[in-house]
Image: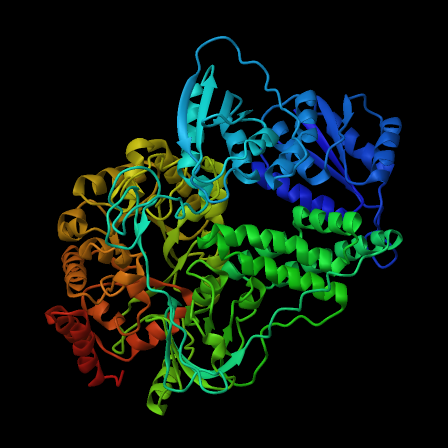
């Protein structure tokens, strides 16, 4: 094992570069120490500089368990400190000083060391890193030819793959490939006549210059060659966990034809291309304006609803971004070091501010703020800005602007979900520039009265700041379903519509009605509609006990994805957890977490609910949540493929390890753990899962009912399991044959559809007959109007986002069991979804005024 010492003038830069490097290898096998800064002043402010004693100490610390140490340095005087450290150190481990770019060299060295490279190899990788960057940027200087070591004699196994992710082989995919090679001699070559690179070499992989759509030949030699090829091919097929929906190909809107790529076209014509075709949607049309250029009352603007609900309030506009700094100023060489220091101080200040904001947040807001903090600490962004100051004399503010712009341009060119991250970079850019210039940063306005926030787009820090404020809905001209606006809006329960052309033309103070279900923004609605929307938006506290008006209990539980969500759910007084989505513990990995790692993750959730029920769903990978180590095939229809419990057919150990980890976690905590399997279609599958789970030491075992077959077989399934939980999102998808991710079919993916309600009724009746619990954990569980119907159909618990607990609890408390049964009968008798809603509304209006 080779150790690495990173010597930097800035402690923050050193830590940020190390954080980025370790993310490349997920910390596996890396021995790295940062010797950065020259201490702190009297106020605790870090002092820029280097300390030879600190460098020597870092070398000696690594000497005990390393075969050699590589030292990387950022600026000139760091070299002097490193050379002096060689004289001051107490150990005699071999040490190499690397003439390498600091950030790029550290990434390359860490990946190479984690892959088992010796000191010479790791040093060579670090030194070659600058060539990889200049090659990616298209620099005119020739990139030094990289000569790969000769391959041992013998036959090699080969595989051809396609680069599917929009950004191609950048640093993160290259690191995943190096890790997946597992010490096997693996080479990659860009076809037809591109260069070859060793899989263990981060820099050489980057020099390949492989972009989306390129074909790569992978060859492996020696023991476990086939396994290495399988692991690396799975990474390519999965797009390295990144978006793959913009892979070029000429196809039709239905995905028909032949060839490779994702078909895109007019929605009707035929052509070539396989995969899911995307019919072109009509371009949004800007609403009419009055003479002053404002949207007029009575107009209805349309976009994409990304967070459900209805709200009405006056419009408040988000202040615009900071103006572009003057690009004509040239800083004298004698003053450039001070400008670099200004950039470094500002990035540190912004990162610390975001870190503090993150510490005060929970759940998805915390994760998004952490991501913004990482952008502020991005050593690449800082290095680019520093280079602009030192080489071209840009001011600190202008250098940050230009460095950020290059990153923005790259993301915008990729389109799709990746382009939605542009707002994140711009937010961090503006924050850093505001600190440099001593300006107040525009943000979410503070108001005493409720308001609808309208903006071109919202930054992660802005959206995360909305919790607890007076904002009741969000409307943006940009953004998509995976943007931070959408994620935070859903977590806070704020109705949100994005992609609304002309939204910023709505006058400040104008009353609008935002419908997050239909994706509409109504300007100047009548008073009756405003009153109805405002009544629906009232936040209702949950008292911690779900029950009907006559005292019949119906447990109200929470859906969670990890420990932070569980804590938030407990604070919201959820009676327990009805759905713990364990796949969130598996995301972002090339291999499954160990049993010990899983135990730690599961205990974090169980600890939040001592003595209360926690229903755990086993790994639900596949369909819209593929994992490279679980879903290895490029399935034409993954929603109907090897997903959920079906993964155990090809990877039984994956399930057995998870069940073992859950049993160990349950034994260590006092929560009442129940485990269920997703995507069950037959009685045989249910019985086999129950046997394996009980054999692992889990007492209460159930299944998810998401397929019509499972619903129709509920009576027989209850003979082999202790409970069932209805996943209404997938149940609607499979019952109506309508992709639930396709917004055009939103009317079909509706739990009020009579076919879905009748299947739920059949399961409820089977549960009553067996005397066993029936839960609901899909979107239907959070609908206050549907809750009495579900209770009347035999459902015994509802699991939802914590924010919905109060309103669902209030809806149940307003009706007795007799009214619930009559509402259920009315819904079952209705021929359409709208008729079901009307019929239920009429029944409940007589008893509760709902």
User: Quadrant of the rendered structure where residue 122 is?
Assistant: top right
x%, y% of residue 757?
18, 64
Residue at horizontal 40 percent and vertical 27 percent from the top:
160
Classify the position of the N terminus by image quarter: top right
Residue at horizontal 52 percent and vertical 37 percent from the top:
169
Q: In this view of the protein, can residue 306 be seen by the observer?
A: yes
Nearer to the camera, 91 or 476 = 476
Q: Is 407 above or below relative to 750?
A: above
The residue positioned farthest toward the bottom in the image shown:
527
Residue at horizontal 30 percent and vertical 49 percent from the top:
277
x%, y% of residue 273?
30, 42
Tell whether 417 sits left or right of 810.
right
Residue at horizontal 23 percent and vertical 68 percent from the top:
791
Nearer to the camera, 487 or 430 = 430
x%, y% of residue 723?
25, 52
Q: Is 806 above or below relative to 146?
A: below
User: Quadrant of the rendered structure where residue 34 is?
Assistant: top right
Tell whether 120 sits left or right of 589.
right
x%, y% of residue 718?
18, 49
């Amino acid at each position: 094992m080779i150790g690495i010492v990173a010597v930097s003038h800035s402690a923050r830069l050193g830590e940020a570069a190390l954080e980025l490097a370790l993310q490349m290898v997920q910390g596996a096998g890396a021995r790295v120490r940062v010797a950065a800064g020259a201490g702190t002043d009297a106020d605790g402010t870090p002092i820029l500089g280097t300390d030879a004693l600190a460098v020597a100490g870092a070398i000696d610390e690594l000497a005990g368990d390393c075969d050699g140490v590589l030292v990387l340095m950022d600026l000139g005087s760091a070299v002097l400190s490193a050379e002096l450290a060689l004289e001051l150190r107490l150990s005699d481990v071999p040490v190499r000083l690397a003439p390498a770019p600091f950030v790029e060299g550290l990434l390359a060295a860490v990946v190479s060391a984690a892959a088992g490279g010796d000191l010479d190899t790791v040093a060579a990788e670090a030194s070659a890193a600058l060539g990889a960057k200049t090659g990616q940027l298209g620099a005119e200087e020739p990139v030094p030819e990289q000569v790969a070591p000769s391959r041992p004699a013998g036959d090699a196994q080969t595989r051809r793959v396609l680069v599917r992710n929009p950004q191609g082989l950048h640093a993160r995919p290259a690191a995943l490939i190096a890790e997946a090679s597992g010490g096997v001699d693996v080479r990659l070559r860009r076809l037809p006549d591109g260069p070859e690179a060793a899989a263990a070499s981060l820099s050489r992989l980057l020099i390949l210059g492989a972009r989306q759509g390129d074909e790569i030949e992978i060859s492996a030699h020696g023991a476990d060659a086939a396994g290495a090829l399988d692991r690396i091919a799975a990474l390519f097929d999965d797009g390295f966990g990144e978006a793959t929906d913009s892979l070029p190909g000429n196809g039709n809107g239905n995905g028909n034809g032949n060839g490779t790529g994702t078909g895109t076209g007019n929605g009707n014509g035929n052509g070539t291309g396989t995969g899911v075709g995307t019919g072109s949607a009509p371009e949004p049309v800007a609403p009419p304006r009055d003479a002053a250029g404002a949207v007029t009352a009575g107009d209805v603007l349309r976009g994409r609803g990304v967070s459900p609900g209805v709200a009405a309030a006056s419009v408040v506009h988000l202040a615009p971004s900071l103006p572009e700094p003057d690009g004509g100023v040239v800083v004298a060489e004698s003053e450039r070091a001070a400008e670099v220091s200004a950039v470094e101080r500002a990035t540190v200040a912004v990162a610390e501010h975001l870190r503090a904001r993150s510490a005060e947040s929970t759940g998805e807001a915390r994760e998004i703020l952490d991501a913004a903090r990482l952008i502020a600490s991005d050593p690449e962004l800082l290095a680019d800005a520093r280079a602009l100051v030192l080489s071209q004399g840009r001011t600190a503010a202008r250098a940050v602007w230009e460095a950020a712009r290059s990153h923005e341009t790259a993301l915008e060119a990729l389109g799709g979900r990746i382009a939605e991250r542009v707002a994140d970079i711009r937010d961090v850019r503006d924050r850093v520039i505001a600190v440099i210039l001593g300006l107040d940063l525009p943000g979410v306005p503070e108001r005493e009265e409720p308001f609808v926030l309208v903006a071109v787009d919202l930054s992660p820090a802005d959206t995360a700041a909305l919790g607890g404020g007076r904002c009741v809905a969000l409307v943006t001209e940009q953004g998509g379903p995976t943007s931070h606006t959408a994620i935070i809006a859903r977590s806070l329960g704020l109705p949100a519509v994005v992609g609304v052309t002309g939204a910023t033309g709505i006058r400040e103070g104008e009353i609008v009605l935002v419908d997050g279900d239909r994706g509409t923004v109504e300007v100047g609605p009548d008073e009756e509609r405003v009153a109805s929307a405002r009544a629906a938006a009232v936040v209702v506290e949950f008292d911690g006990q779900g029950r009907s008006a006559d005292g019949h209990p119906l447990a109200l539980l929470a859906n969670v994805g990890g420990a932070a969500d569980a804590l938030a759910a407990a604070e919201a007084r959820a009676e327990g957890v009805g759905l713990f989505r364990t796949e969130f513990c598996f995301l972002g990995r090339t291999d499954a977490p160990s049993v010990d790692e899983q135990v730690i993750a599961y205990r974090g959730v169980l600890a939040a609910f001592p003595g209360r029920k926690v229903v755990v769903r086993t790994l639900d990978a596949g369909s819209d949540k593929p994992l490279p180590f679980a879903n290895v095939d490029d399935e034409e229809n993954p929603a109907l493929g090897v997903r959920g419990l079906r993964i155990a057919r090809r990877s039984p150990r994956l399930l057995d390890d998870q069940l073992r980890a859950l049993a160990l976690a349950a034994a260590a905590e006092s929560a009442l753990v129940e485990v269920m399997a997703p995507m069950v279609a037959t009685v045989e599958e249910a019985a086999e899962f129950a046997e394996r789970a009980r054999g692992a030491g889990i007492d209460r075992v159930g299944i998810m009912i998401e397929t019509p077959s499972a619903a129709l077989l509920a009576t027989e399934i209850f003979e082999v399991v202790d409970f069932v939980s209805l996943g209404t999102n997938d149940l609607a998808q499979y019952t109506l044959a309508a992709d639930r991710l396709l917004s055009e079919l939103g009317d079909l993916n509706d739990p009020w559809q009579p076919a879905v309600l009748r299947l739920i009724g059949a399961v409820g009746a089977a549960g009553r007959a067996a005397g066993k619990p029936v839960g609901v954990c899909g979107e239907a569980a959070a609908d206050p109007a549907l809750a009495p119907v579900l209770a009347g159909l035999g459902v015994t618990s509802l699991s939802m986002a914590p924010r919905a607990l109060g309103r669902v609890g209030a809806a149940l408390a307003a009706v007795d069991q007799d009214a619930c049964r009559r509402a259920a009968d009315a819904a079952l008798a209705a021929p359409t979804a709208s008729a079901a809603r009307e019929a239920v509304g009429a029944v409940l209006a007589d008893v509760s005024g709902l």
